[in-house]
Amino acid sequence: MSESVQAAAAKAPAPDSNRWKALTFIALAQLMVVLDATIVNIALPSAQQDLGISDGNRQWVITAYALAFGGLLLFGGRIADLWGRKRAFVAGLIGFAGASALGGAATNEAMMLGARALQGAFGALLAPAALSLLAVMFTDAKERAKAFGIYGAIAGGGGAVGFILGGVLTEYMDWRWTFFVNIPFAIVAAAGAYFVIREPAEGRNRSPLDIPGVVLSTLGLVSLVYGFTRAESDGWGDSVTVGMFVASAVLLAAFVFVESKVKAPLLPLRVITERNRGGVYLSLGLAIIAMFGLFLFLTYYLQLVKGYSPVKTGFAFLPMIAGMIVGSTQIGTRLMTRVAPRLLMAPGFLVAGAGMLLLTQLEIGSSYVSTILPSMVLLGLGMGTAFMPAMSLATTGVEPRDAGVASAMVNTSQQVGGAIGTALLNTIAASATTSYIKDHIAGAGSQSQQQLVQLQGQVHGYTNAIWFAVGILVLAAAIAFTFINVGKPDMSSAPGFGDDVEDDLKVPVIAH
């Protein structure tokens, strides 16, 4: 019997009596992180105006968070495996609260972007630790499914809470409260976790930290996203833009080479080279690229073009959140034990693509009910349906000592996808808007006609970028269908026993 099987067998008979209390505090932390992602989208137009952030730099409020989160997630996942998941979880929460206080107190663009990057860094420590804790505390198959179902429902609901709370705080108080609101969440979750969670010692990775891997992966990812962001202001042919892409390719290639040679790699290549996991990481990353850009455009379309208040904008996003919850809990969860994952993921991405296709018809006078509402429902249902089997499959078959870094890898594909999506689609939209206004402004005589051309140019830019997002979702569906070839999961045996214990470790990871 292998060491991992002995460890699993030893801990299975006596699950932690506080595990359900621990789930409460872990879910609260997850709610805070999801809340933070959506709340800032709603507050962004107000914060941009107050702090004098240019249109070209506004995306950095989103990108700085996603980039720090994505760039440091592998490091955070390995730190949780080495240092202790409970310690990493509590430290991540305290740091996140401090960074939120800094963001709320921001007096200029640099302070705001710095606070967002710090939030991302502490989020990168917090997220893999939380997921690893759930994985080691819930050893029974049925209990684990129930725990992750509750966790997922709270995470999905957190998006809705974020949109509405963001609108209410921005409109009736101040955008700064969208940052300050994280502080009580973090304090309660950290205190509860400190007193309630007792982390099992088994499954801890005692290997030394792979410093070259940390440096190469972080710099490689930062260069990649900075290249996309730089392209918006300086063009794709700019020497610095091209240099960033070249540097990223070299750094990430060096990272893969180092990981194949060192004894204790930051990211064991066995985690990503397995065909099904690779397919999940790639298709999920592409889908997030499409979705993140869309969130930004719809927020600006509703507030700047349609004149919606922040609160009304928040409620306008609710049908998408409702669709995600229904797709995830009613369609994805019910069918994932009956059909192969690719038969849920590929159609899910295509349904989301159909919703995106509706949004290519946006005009200044488009009706919310006839155009935006059905597209949001389709987007939510499609992404929710693809979501559950993807998260389950993404960490199936990993060894327990790699659980943290495998969870982190899923989040990395999402966070880097989000950063690339925001930068890439914003770049496409901005250049389309500029060329439209240049072509049409000469014919606009009065000031009101010029304002109309400006608005038409903005909407033209959004729809141009959304066409690219449709193509990206179709590509995600094609990758999911061709790469992922595993059959429907065998749910008859509980994890923790037998020679294939590693193959039974399923750690669903919730999107941020």
Image: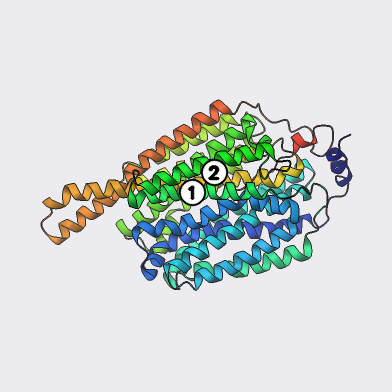
Residue 53 pos. (x, y %): 37, 64
Question: Which residue position holds label 1?
Answer: 223
Neighbor class of circle 1 (other Cα within 10 Å; few <14, some 14-19, many 20+) is many
Please report contact status of discs 1 and 2: CB closer than 8 Å, yes or no: yes
Which of the 4 quarters of the picture holds residue 272? top right
Q: Amino acid at mark 1?
A: Ser
**Residue 366 showing in the rendered view:** no
Residue at screen point 69% across, 65% down: 190
Q: Give me the residue at 49% from left, 61% from top.
A: 39
Total marks shown come to 2
Q: Is residue 2 visible?
A: yes
Circle 1 or circle 2, nearest the eye: 2
Please, what secondary structure does the residue beneath circle 1 have?
Answer: helix
Above or below for 71 versus 379: below
Hey, which quadrant is residue 390 in on the image? top right
Question: Which quadrant: the N terminus?
Answer: top right
Q: What residue is disc 2 on?
A: 251
Query: Residue 464, labelled with which disc?
Result: none
How far is the residue under mark 1 from the one under mark 2? 9 Å
Q: Residue at coordinates 60% horizontally, 67% vertically from top-left?
A: 97
Q: In the image, is 366 to the left or to the right of 474? A: left
